[in-house]
């Protein structure tokens, strides 16, 4: 129970920043890459991310959080987003 609370507290400190992917041929942003940031430092949360991906159970919690954050927007359902995965997350 305490472990779940710790994970929830860590997730609550995460946010996603949308970085435009610029299409030079169209001279406009075509898609977005979502960057994981810490609300506290506005930087990639290295230690917290490493904690989540160290085992499958924690990694699944992190990927579920991403899924919840990526719910399609009814305003722009055609928008595409990309996230980078650490190779370890695939196993």
Image: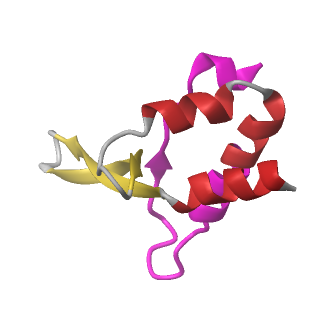
Give x and y (percent) for residue 27: 12, 49
What residue is drawn where x is 40% and y is 51%? Answer: 38
Residue 68: x percent and y percent? Answer: 66, 63
Look at the image and say whether residue 73 sits in the magenta stretch.
yes
Magenta highlight on residue 2: no
Q: Which colour style is shown?
A: secondary structure
Question: Which residue is pictured at 35% across the width and 56% down the height?
Answer: 40
Bounds of the magenta segment: 63-91
Q: How many numbered dots are placed on residues in this image?
A: 0
Relative to 81, is 79 above or below?
below
Residue 23 on image: x %, y %? 22, 42
Tell which of 72 and 18 is nearer to you.
18
Q: Quadrant of residue 91?
A: top right
Up/down of 1 relative to 90, above or below = below
Residue at (54%, 38%) from the top-left corner?
Answer: 48
Q: Residue furthest right?
A: 1
Residue drawn where x is 75% and y is 38% of the image: 58
In this rendered view, identify the residue nearer to me: 58 or 33.
58
- Residue sitting farthest toward the bottom: 75
Left or right: residue 26 compared with residue 1: left
Q: Is residue 55 visible?
A: yes
Where is residue 72 drawn, in percent x and y?
58, 69
Query: Where, quadrant-wise, is the N terminus in this rendering?
Result: bottom right
Q: Is residue 70 visible?
A: no
Answer left or right for 9 relative to 43. right
């Amino acid at each position: 129970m305490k472990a779940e609370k710790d994970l929830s507290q860590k997730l609550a400190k995460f946010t996603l920043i949308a970085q435009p992917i610029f299409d030079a041929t169209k001279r406009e942003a075509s898609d977005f890459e979502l960057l994981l940031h810490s609300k506290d430092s506005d930087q990639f949360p290295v230690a917290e991310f490493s904690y989540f991906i160290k085992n499958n159970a924690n990694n699944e919690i992190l990927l579920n959080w991403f899924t919840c954050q990526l719910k399609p927007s009814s305003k722009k359902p055609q928008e595409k987003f990309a996230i980078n995965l650490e190779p370890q997350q695939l196993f």
